[in-house]
Image (tube, helix red, strand yellow):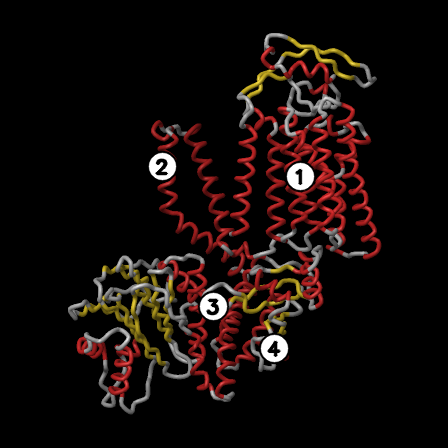
Amino acid sequence: MREFAITIFSSLLFFLLLFFSFVGIQQSTLRLPFFYYSSGLIANVGTQSQEHWGKKAHVEDLTQFEKKEFLRTDEKYPVRIQQEDGDYKTFYFELIEFNKLDILSIFFLDLFLAFFSLITSVYFYYSTRDGLIFAFFFNLGVILLANVFLLSYNSTVFLFFFALYIGAFLHYHLIYRLRGKEIPSKWLLPQILIAFIVAVVADQETRDLGLLEKISTIGHGLNLVFGIINLTLIVFDLVKIKPQNDALWKRISLFASIAIFISVPVSLIFFNGQPWFFIHRSFFFFTYILFIITFFYGTYRYTFVPSFVIFTPTIITLVLVSITIGIYAIMIVILDYIVPIPYLKERWFFNLIFLFILTSYLIPVKLKVKQLIDYWFFEKNQILREGIDSITSLISSPITMRKTILSIYKTVMDTLNINNIIILIPGDQFARTDLRNVNFIRIPSQSEIWNYFLNNDRVTVTSHLEYGIGLRETLYNFLKGMGTQLAFPVYDLSASKKTVRAMILLGEKSDKRYFSIGELKFINEVVKITSMLLENYSLLEAEIQKRKIVRDIQTASIVDNTLRLILPSDIKWVEYGFFSKPAVGISGDYLDLIPVSSSKMIVLLGDVAGHGLGTGFLVSAIKGIVREQLRNGTSLEGLFREINSFFRARYKGNEFMTLLGGVLDSKEKTFKFINAGHLALVEMDPNGTVIAHSKTQRVLGILETDYQSQELKLKPETKLFLFSDGITETFGENDDLFGEEGLIEFLHFHDHETVKELPPLLEAKINQFRGSKEQADDLTFIALTFAKN
């Protein structure tokens, strides 16, 4: 979203610049029915006096129109215009009234191109971090904008000539950039000074027709010379490198782009303004758009998918905006022309109704759009669907982690038809493990390449780096040397902040085609699974190294660190205590305490069906989903919906989970919670009265459900208790059940104890009640309250 926000900000900045350009200019003015430059050259703008386009009006005749207070619309004024034979002929013109906003209709195409140049510059910078190309297109936008005000009001002479010369120098730098080189920045200062001096001279000598023409010709001439050099070097590259297939077309596209760009200076210098001054300006508009497209295609070595924009809320937002605008426009047309309704003719009344309807149905429509995108581009593809199902089944299979990773490698390569897949990790991960036969590659954690991946948490397209310099060139050679086409970041699920743990490097497809949208969605899902596997692999390796037991799965008991709680220490006025004890190996209970703000904490306690390594993977996956969603600002209701969607999409009803979770607010003294098939939330007030809130909703993973939250208003010193069914379903030596009655009795008996003292006392009570019987289920219990002060 950062790029989208920056683009919007830049657009607003552009329009603010446009607005303030109007400030200080009178509301309306009288002017000739044609537009001309300070030199007298008549531009091909507007619909009147087309027979004079490309000719020159006598500057002395034009000066009479500077004294606007003496001008009248009912008189005709003589203006001498130079003809093809060089002689001047006198024409008489009636003046027209030119309002401020007329500039928007007359110069609409020019203003749009200026805006389009600005958007292009922003896109290039935030997709490639290339400041030169950003400056190149931004300067083009400035030239177009300055040209509008130069024609309309004979102002911005300085800005126009400054941008003209800076643009020529930027084109000079572009020659090197397109070959992966860069001119030292020290040369920028003299170039800026030259452009500044030339612009000052032009601004001060607007009366000197000959001087302005020479300055303009030199500026266009510089651009033409640098363009010819650029084209020559592109041809030289074609002959020397002899690119094939797509690479050949992209070089040709780049050649066409530069040729289109220098067509204006060619026309102005060699053909005395022809042919540009004798054709409609829409032709200039389309050729400029063609220049942008061919430049984009020629400098980019891949398709229009450099990032995860397809799979983030951005694309859904764009679809929703398009649908909303379309519906609104259709409704306006219907109300204005087809079925005029008197009450709705008042636009504010219609807008209010439309806004109300929009806010009521926007979320369901958004979910439906997301489902449609997933269905058409991913789920409908049988190969991709079978691939993700195969990977999902591998996770819960009773095989070693190493074999799981190798099997996933093979499945991904077969599904995507790629020739290689590598996981790049920093050197301090799995330091004592031999990873050579699982396609892991270590890289120094302090290297500039790894630091690039840490600071650029986006998909890296190798071909996008081809025209880079410095670190970008180093990174390009590194990835190209390993045959990598795309590099996807894998995030650390256990980190409180979004950090890159590893990079998945994908090779080219065997058929040399680009990845489709569905395949990129598939890769995105594989990245999430890989993140979960790396988390478990890291924990498993640490445990194995600690206890030196390789074959016994029981050594993975500490792998319960999958649930590593990052205990919230910065939540004011909240006290809590807990214990969590797995039955075997890895716990299937999910306990998480996550600080949301200085006064809010999210508490989650869930139970995944089953025990062992498979449930540990699921618990780890849920933990990653929760952390990612909370980082994105998802609500409590949205969090439950996402977890439910995860189970339904992956396991289709074969796996499910109960979950009780809520937001504890120490400032408002409230607990907003949702219970999805879990045991009741138990509340004990300061007087020792116990209340069980047993209202639940559908278990996660069965059917699509719109989860709704409940809210409790709590008194100070009120205690809340969350627990798993392992507590209440503990059996004693005589097969008697501990049950909810036993738990409530325990809480009544220890109502004077603090929440920190209760968990160890309950654990001891459970052990005493169980006696010699083995623990049959995972045990988790947490107690919370507000501090007295």
Q: Earlier in the sequence, mark 2 or mark 1?
A: 1
Q: Quadrant of residue 68?
A: top right
Spatial CA span between label 3 and label 4: 25 Å
Residue at far top of view: 75
- Image marks 4 and 2: residues in contact by CB distance under 8 Å: no
Secondary structure, mark 1, is helix
Tag 1: amino acid: Leu
**Residue of label 3:** 495
**Residue of label 2:** 352
Which residue sits at x=35%, y=78%? Answer: 580
Q: Earlier in the sequence, mark 3 or mark 4?
A: 4
**Residue of label 1:** 140
Q: Is residue 253 visible?
A: no
Tag 4: amino acid: Val
Tag 2: amino acid: Leu
Residue at far bottom of view: 772
Tag 3: amino acid: Ala
Q: Position of residue 367 (x, y in %)?
A: 43, 54
Q: Position of residue 6 (x, y in %)?
A: 54, 47
Please tell me whether residue 438 is drawn above or below residue 663 in the rendered image: below
Q: Position of residue 787 (x, y in %)?
A: 26, 66
Q: Earlier in the sequence, mark 2 or mark 3?
A: 2
> In this image, 260 relative to 304: left or right?
right
Would you call the spot at circle 1 few (<14 residues within 10 Å), some (14-19), or many (20 or more)? many
Marks 3 and 4: which is nearer the front? Answer: 3
**Residue of label 4:** 438
- Image marks 1 and 4: residues in contact by CB distance under 8 Å: no
Spatial CA span between label 4 and label 2: 60 Å
Q: Nearer the viewer, residue 554 or 80?
A: 80
Q: Earlier in the sequence, mark 4 or mark 2?
A: 2
